[in-house]
Image (cartoon, rainbow, N blue to C red):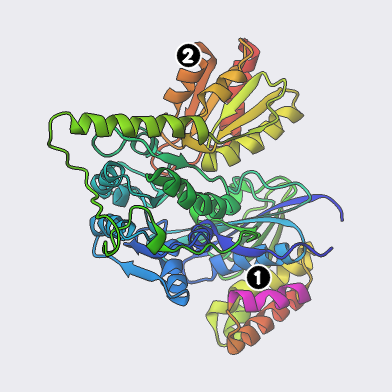
Amino acid sequence: MTPAKKILITGNEACGEGAVTAGCGFYAGYPITPQNELTAYMSKRMDECGRVFIQSESELAAINMVLGASLTGERAMTTSSSPGISLMQEGISYLAGCQLPAVIVNVMRGGPGLGNIAASQADYFQATKGGGHGDYNMVILAPAGVQEMFECTYEAFDIAERYRNPVMILSDGIIGQMMEPIEVRYPQKSVDPDKSPWALRGCKGRESRSIRSLFLKEGALEEWNRDLQRKFRTMEAKEVRYETYKTGGARLIFVAYGTSARICRAVVDKLRQEGVKAGLFRPVSLWPFPYKKLKGLDKGTTVFFDVEMSAGQMLYDVRLAVADDSRVLFHGRMGGGVPEEADIINIAKKAVKRK
Amino acid sequence: MKAFKESILCAGHGGQGIVSMGKLLAYAGMQAGYQVTFFPSYGAEVRGGTAHSMVRIQYPEAIANPVITHPTVAIIMNKPSLDKFLGRIAPGGVLLYDAAAAEKIPEKTGVTIKKIPCTAIALKLKDKRVANMAALGSLSKIKGLFSLQELIQCLPFIFSGKQDLIEKNTEALRQGFNEV
């Protein structure tokens, strides 16, 4: 058997390669486990491609360098893990306020505080409900494997530019550090910052532009916000992504993303072998959350089982979609704990027996 | 090709090449056309801390969960890891451990236990670090998942083509294979 040409790399490296292939021209980052392979990979690859890599003095500096690079029309990215992403929230709000594209990657680790270096999913609220100040949203993509780390990152740059808004990849330490074979089958993109409709690169021969998030004139900020909100509604309508696995005729539907979704897919197969009609709904866009698609799977008696590496954060969105809390189960592990298949199976079987 | 599923756990302390062992198996699996996932786990400071890596290799079904709780094959290189993982090996599984980790370990029903002098082989080759490859050589004989030749061919991936390291590790693989 001759398999297709594949390379064995970590999720972190695949993310970096996705960015390089998407034409990322500027990267700034500060090392933090469990995303170090990503910064290390970019230090090598960006240099090879003649692009800019900066190991910044802090995460705060990194996000503001990204804002500066984005102002010049370059495709810009920064990556970090939970504590570092917290430091970046002001900059993310400014990017959204200035309507500037950027890609931010969070390879989540255990928190709160400095936490630990194990995988976690406890930054869902921060990512999807606005970690920084002001009324803003951003598309949040949650890859569940190494191939998707590449693909989501590759696509994130296009989404960011389409709406002139930051996009976040919300991954975790397991997806970041695990290795899987991937196929790199996307064309290398080239970006011409001179053609960027917002870039500030000198205005000789054209009208001057300004980019800001400060609007002091009466009513101006409200008007600006109305424009932003119209953009967010379009994003909500157009950027929903999800995957279903064996949900047809399922009585019990798991809802999980990232690593938890991988675990639940194994659980679905085991439960099916034991005669329990189980399925999996995996949101790929955590914002916009696929409320309608999830609601559409509800047959009125369907049990939904949300599994996360957190105390239950996406759970609120699942409850909102299903609108009947009595049919929404939850199992989560915190602080770097990983849900075990056997525990999930026990809870699922008890619930199905009860119904 | 016959359908199969193996979940392999490599464990020891930082510096024993636990991550390289897992990577080599995953790479060999990919080269053979199987489904593979590899997941490393180590402390913040690698050398000295405990380390393990988890490799799933199967065919033809795609791999869902990369995290392994009950390995079908455990390759254990130090005593603390033996204490931690012995009870978790799946029924019908195989445990291969370095003789330097423990003189004797309790029998476990339904688990095939093999003690291999991995560190002794490595010391004979004047490089303690190649004990991991001696273990993989023995595994090749015991499990037959990959032939000795298949493993040797994958060494350049792990050692980025560094010829002296490849030669030394090839020899460790061979001696581990012949030990069983």
Q: Label 1 belongs to which residue? A: B135
Q: Position of residue B39 (x, y in %)?
A: 56, 56
Chain of the residue where label 2 is placed in the rendered structure? A
Question: What is the three-letter code of the residue carrying label 2?
Answer: Asp
Please, what is the dominant secondary structure of the magenta stretch?
helix
What amino acid is found at the position of numbered circle 1 in the picture? Answer: Ala
| Residue B87 in the image, given as x and y percentages of width and height | 60, 47
Quarter of the C terminus of chain A within the rendering: top right
Give the answer, above or below, for where A242 lies relative to B151: above
Identified at 72% across, 45% down, the residue is: B91
Visible in this render: residue B101? no
Nearest the viewer among A112 and A250 is: A250
| Mark pair 2, 1: CA separation | 52 Å
Please name the residue shown 75% across and 23% down the image.
Answer: A275
Q: Which residues are magenta?
A: B149-158
Residue A171 image position (x, y, % from top left): 46, 47
As drawn, is B153 to the left or to the right of B133? right
Crowd around label 1: few <14 · some 14–19 · many ≥20 (10 Å): many
Task: State whether discs 2 and 1 lie on one chain.
Answer: no
Residue beneath the point at 39% across and 33% down? A232
Foreground residue among A354 and A109: A109
Q: Which residue is mark 2?
A: A325
Callout 2: SS: helix
The quadrant in which residue A61 appears is bottom left
Nearest the eye: A113 or B170? A113
Residue beneath the point at 60% across and 53% down: A147
Q: Is residue A323 left or right of residue B30?
A: left
Q: Quadrant of residue A224?
A: top left
Given the image, what chain letter belongs to the residue carrying mark 1? B
Q: Crowdedness of circle 2 by 10 Å Cα count: few (<14), some, many (20+)?
A: some
Residue B115, disc: none
Residue B141 counted in the magenta span: no
